[in-house]
């Protein structure tokens, strides 16, 4: 990642990082955010698809509006169709591991 980043931002060459993020990326199949309700008082926000830094603030605001009784924007997001993971639970972990290995290899080579 550092090699690719310094190609884009050469002025950062030699900058040391105190910490870096590594973990699962929350990607929905259609790459759209998935926000809505599970019940009267249970809300969720997921599927940021690589836009979490910008989108989480908006998700928080939209859900806060719904909690206050103004659910119009949350209802709009909740109408976006989302589909279950292909292969269901049985293939979710093996395909996730394979995809993460592929992207790690690709990052190392490019």
Image: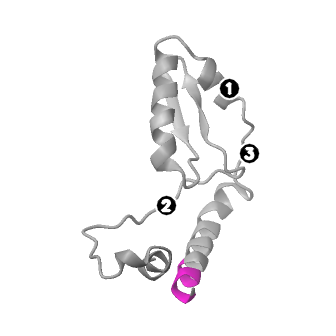
The residue range painted magenta reads 104-109
Q: Residue at x 61, y 42 (%)?
A: 33
Q: Secondary structure at mark 2?
A: loop
Looking at marks 2 and 1 on the same chain, the residue that comes earlier in the sequence is marked by 2
Q: Which residue is mark 1?
A: 76
Label 2 to label 1: alpha-carbon separation? 27 Å
**Residue 105 location, quadrant:** bottom right
Q: Residue at x 61, y 79 (%)?
A: 102
* 69 with respect to 76 (left or right): left
Q: Residues within 10 Å of mark 3 (few under 14, many from 20)?
A: few
Q: Secondary structure at mark 1?
A: helix
Task: Establish if 6 lies above or below 20.
Answer: below
- Residue 98: within the magenta? no
Task: Establish if 12 lies above or below 30.
Answer: below
Q: Which residue is mark 3?
A: 83
Task: Give the image location of residue 6, x and y in percent.
Answer: 43, 78
Looking at marks 3 and 2 on the same chain, the residue that comes earlier in the sequence is marked by 2
Residue furthest front in the image:
11
Q: Secondary structure at mark 3?
A: loop
Depth check, front residue: 44 or 66: 66
Task: Give the image location of residue 85, x and y in percent.
Answer: 70, 53
Task: Give the image location of residue 88, x and y in percent.
Answer: 70, 55
Depth check, front residue: 55 or 6: 6
- Tags 3 and 1 in contact by the CB under 8 Å rule? no
Label 3 to label 1: alpha-carbon separation? 17 Å
Q: Quadrant of the C terminus?
A: bottom right
Q: Which residue is mark 2?
A: 24
């Amino acid at each position: 990642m550092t090699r690719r980043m310094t190609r884009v931002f050469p002025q950062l060459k030699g900058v040391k990082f105190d910490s870096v993020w590594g973990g699962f990326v929350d990607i929905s199949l259609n790459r759209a955010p998935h926000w809505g309700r599970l019940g009267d008082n249970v809300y969720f926000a997921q599927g940021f698809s690589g836009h979490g830094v910008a989108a989480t603030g908006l998700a928080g605001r939209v859900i806060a509006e719904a909690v206050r009784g103004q659910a119009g924007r949350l209802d709009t997001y909740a109408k976006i169709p989302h589909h279950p993971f292909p292969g269901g639970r049985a293939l979710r972990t093996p395909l996730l591991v394979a995809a993460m290995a592929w992207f790690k290899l690709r990052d190392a080579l490019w």
